[in-house]
């Protein structure tokens, strides 16, 4: 299959500009005019030098003065026009930067919940925010150079061939060599290195965010060396990529720098040759000065062109990454969406595999959870418990079978309707950088003070609020105000209670809580799930003894199903898990006895 050719980078950026699309072509046009005006002084200086050298005893002062004033005026004009070109390009850049962030975040907000399992917050921020900043720098500062890269060579080549084609060809030798070197540096290999460089930079950024966020847990469990390894490896990988990329350019860049400064080495022999052949000395000297003055323009032009080409590659990488991030398969919703009447939950022969995996995460899962019932999912890690819980909320679409809420396929329920009827409490809690009040009422409008206080009491969070000087108005993360994992979990439970959805999904909500917080969270969970359809994942089996039904999940299938008493009597997987759990609960840490001299215990 033939690979579709990419559109030019500026065309790909246009959709992010909204109604200000005219700013880009305006910036290019003004930049082109500025380039023309900036070349005029060199031509006028050549006229002045030729006027002086051709008749040093009878210099026409009026002509020299006119040329000087025109050179001054054109230089000022070039600066002014370039100023307006930069204003246009900066306005265009701001529009694109804001547009990319708006479009990116709007699209991300509409993503299925499974999207956020695959992409970390650090990676998303790196691609959207940093990517938008990179395109801003490209458009604001490199875009004007694009017009110069197109207009300047045409004008300069015409000039150097018209003034004296022989010296012009001599001055073109280093330029041609420099151009060939530049094309080598912008080769496919260099572009591939550029992609790998951005991959390693993105990975390092993502790992740094995740590492910093996990520092409290790392310090608690004394795993600093092991947890730092992934972050350290990403830094080393980035260092190696930067070194390899630099070494790729070392020799060609050195040659490019030397050759672009060597115009005089080609012009001097040509000037001597022309004078030796009897050419007019004054004219040859005037032309020689003109080429010496104008040759650095080519050097500057090629350097700008090289940087422009490099920044085009970077901008393309940024857009490719944003497109790749946003090119996530969305959910399709039926045009005839239905409202949820009852709040039962049913899985019918559900089969599901994660993207890129040949193994089924769930294999023909079927169960029914009637309205008001509580079911617990237990089993070894990786068995499929979390997958079941998240398919209930349509994080992803199933490969086969159906997930029904109130007897309606979740595909036929609008996203808002489904989310209004389901509350989540995950083991990894997220609190926003706002006040505790904002965190508690998040997701529901028009919440009264009485309702907030009731949720705080029911979630066992009153003590947390009272210990803070500003109470509910305390801003999280401000002036060192942070909560422990268990405290955050209780605030998350208060949020779920305010929402008061009829279906509750609990994904190991007490996994990272200390014993004191776990006790309080368990009381809050009972309050939250009372009278509601509840699907919970539990790793502490004592928390599932009183549920209506326990599903033992093993290798993506329901291995056993029943109440706590039923499963113990079967003497199967659950009984083994229960016995092992009881043994771990009974573990005690005893002081090691030491033996002294003579066999006496010390």
Image: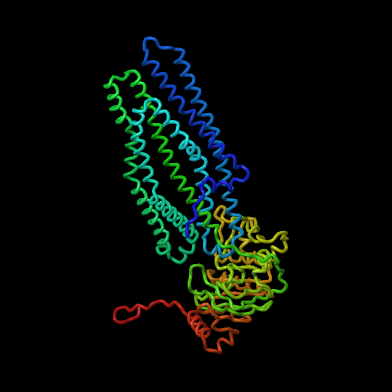
In front of the other: 371 or 329: 329
As drawn, the residue found furthest toward the left would be: 276
Q: Quadrant of residue 378?
A: bottom right
| Residue 59 higher or lower than 312, as above or below | above
Q: How many marks?
A: 0
Residue 469, image x and y in percent? 62, 56
Q: Residue at x 33, y 21 (%)?
A: 284
| Residue drawn at 36 percent across, 16 percent down | 53
Q: Position of residue 93 (x, y in %)?
A: 55, 43
Residue displayed at 59% across by 87% down:
565
Given residues 511 and 505, the one toward you in this image is 505
| Quarter of the rendering containing residue 538 | bottom right
Front residue of this view, candidates 513 and 57: 57
Image: 48 above or below 209 = above
Asked whether residue 527 appears in the rendered view, the answer is no
Q: How is the image coloured?
A: rainbow
Q: Position of residue 273 (x, y in %)?
A: 27, 25
Camera-side residue of 596 and 109: 109
- Residue 465 position in % (x across, y down): 63, 61
Q: Considering the image in quadrants, where does the C terminus appear?
A: bottom left
């Amino acid at each position: 299959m033939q690979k579709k050719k990419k559109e030019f980078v500026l065309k790909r950026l246009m959709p992010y500009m909204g109604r200000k699309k005219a700013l880009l072509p305006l910036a290019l046009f003004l930049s082109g005019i500025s380039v023309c005006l900036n070349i005029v002084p060199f031509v006028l200086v050549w006229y002045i030098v030729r006027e002086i050298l051709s008749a040093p005893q009878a210099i026409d002062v009026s002509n020299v003065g006119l040329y000087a004033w025109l050179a001054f005026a054109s230089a000022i004009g070039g600066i002014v026009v370039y100023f307006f070109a930069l204003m246009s390009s900066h306005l265009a850049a701001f529009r694109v930067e804001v547009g990319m962030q708006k479009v990116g975040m709007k699209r991300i907000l509409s993503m299925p919940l499974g999207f956020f399992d695959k992409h970390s917050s650090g990676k998303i921020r790196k691609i959207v925010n940093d990517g938008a900043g990179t395109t801003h720098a490209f458009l604001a500062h490199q875009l004007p150079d694009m017009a110069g890269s197109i207009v300047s060579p045409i004008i300069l080549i015409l000039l150097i061939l018209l003034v004296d084609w022989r010296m012009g060809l001599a001055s073109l030798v280093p330029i041609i060599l420099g151009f060939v070197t530049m094309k080598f540096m912008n080769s496919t290999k260099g572009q591939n290195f550029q992609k790998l460089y951005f991959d390693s930079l993105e990975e390092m950024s993502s790992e740094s965010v995740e590492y910093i966020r996990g520092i409290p847990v790392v310090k608690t469990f004394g795993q600093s060396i092991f947890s730092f390894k992934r972050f350290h490896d990403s830094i080393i990988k980035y260092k190696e990529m930067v070194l390899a990329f630099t070494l790729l350019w070392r020799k060609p860049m050195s040659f490019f720098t030397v050759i672009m400064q060597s115009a005089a080495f080609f012009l001097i022999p040509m000037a001597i040759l022309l004078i030796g052949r009897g050419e007019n000395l004054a004219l040859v000297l005037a032309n020689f000065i003109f080429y010496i003055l104008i040759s650095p323009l080519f050097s500057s032009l090629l350097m700008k062109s090289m940087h422009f080409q490099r920044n085009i590659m970077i901008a393309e990488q940024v857009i490719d990454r944003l497109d790749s991030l946003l090119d996530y398969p969305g959910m399709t919703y039926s045009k005839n969406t239905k409202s949820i009447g009852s709040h039962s939950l049913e899985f019918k022969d559900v089969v599901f595999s994660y993207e890129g995996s040949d193994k089924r995460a769930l294999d023909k899962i079927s169960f029914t959870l009637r309205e008001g019932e509580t079911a617990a999912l237990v089993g070894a890690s990786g068995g499929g418990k979390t997958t079941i819980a998240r398919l209930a909320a349509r994080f992803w679409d199933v490969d086969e079978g159906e997930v029904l809420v109130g007897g309606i396929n979740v595909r036929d329920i609008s996203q808002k309707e489904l989310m209004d009827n389901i509350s989540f409490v995950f083991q990894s809690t997220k609190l926003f950088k706002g006040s505790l009040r904002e965190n508690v009422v998040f997701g529901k409008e028009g919440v009264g003070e009485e309702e907030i206080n009731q949720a705080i009491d029911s979630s066992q969070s009153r003590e947390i609020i009272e210990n803070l000087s500003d109470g509910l108005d305390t801003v999280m993360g401000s002036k060192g105000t942070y909560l422990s994992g268990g405290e955050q979990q209780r605030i998350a439970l208060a949020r779920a209670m305010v929402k008061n959805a009829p279906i509750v999904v609990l994904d190991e909500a007490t996994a990272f809580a200390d014993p004191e917080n776990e006790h309080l969270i368990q009381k809050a969970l009972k309050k939250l799930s009372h009278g509601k359809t509840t699907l919970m994942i539990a790793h502490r089996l004592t928390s599932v003894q009183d549920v209506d039904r326990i599903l033992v999940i093993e290798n993506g299938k329901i291995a056993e199903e029943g109440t706590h008493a039923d499963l113990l009597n079967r003497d199967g997987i659950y009984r083994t898990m229960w016995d092992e759990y009881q043994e771990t609960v009974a573990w005690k840490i005893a002081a090691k006895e030491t033996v002294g001299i003579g066999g006496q215990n010390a």
